[in-house]
Amino acid sequence: QVQLVESGGGLVQAGGSLRLSCAASGSIFSIDVMGWYRQAPGKQRVLVAYITNGGSTNYADSVKGRFTISRDNGKNTMYLQMNSLKPEDTAVYYCNSVPFSSQYRGQGTQVTVSS
């Protein structure tokens, strides 16, 4: 069973950048669509970006033009490059399949953007 581990979060000032990584314990090729989700305190988890095995991507309007999702099936890793960060991007970020599956849920990585 594939396990996903997120990393790369941290504290950054508004306008800064972070790169999140999602490392898989096994092949992610079997997961056709992978995505990055985020959950802010007191709010529901939302999908911010996803990528297919074929490389097609899609972004939530709130991050479009600022975030870039990518995946390297050879390295069993997915990434989220986040630029021009805003305080409203503060959340715990999770990688998972799309749709979300509890079998892949990791601990997430905290992203905090200060104003």
Image: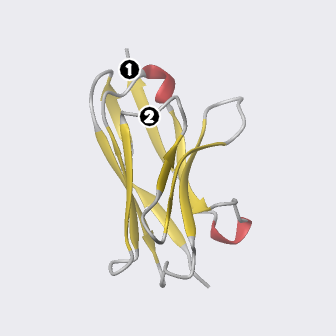
Residue shown at 36% from the left, 28% from the top: 85
Residue bearing the label numbered 1: 114
Give residue 53's position: percent from left, percent from top: 48, 72
> Mark 2 packing: few (<14 Cα in 10 Å), some, or many (20+)?
few
If you read the primary sequence from the N terminus, does the residue marked by circle 1 or circle 2 appear first? 2
Residue bearing the label numbered 2: 64
Residue type at tag 1? Ser
Lateral position of residue 30 relative to residue 27, left or right: right
Residue type at tag 2? Lys
Give residue 88's position: percent from left, percent from top: 50, 23
The correct choice, above or below, for 113 with respect to 82 in the image is above
Q: Which image quadrant for residue 73? A: bottom left
> Mark 1 packing: few (<14 Cα in 10 Å), some, or many (20+)?
some
Name of the residue lying farthest toward the top: 115
Query: Can residue 36 be seen in the rendering of this structure?
Result: yes
Q: Nearer the viewer, residue 53 or 99?
A: 53
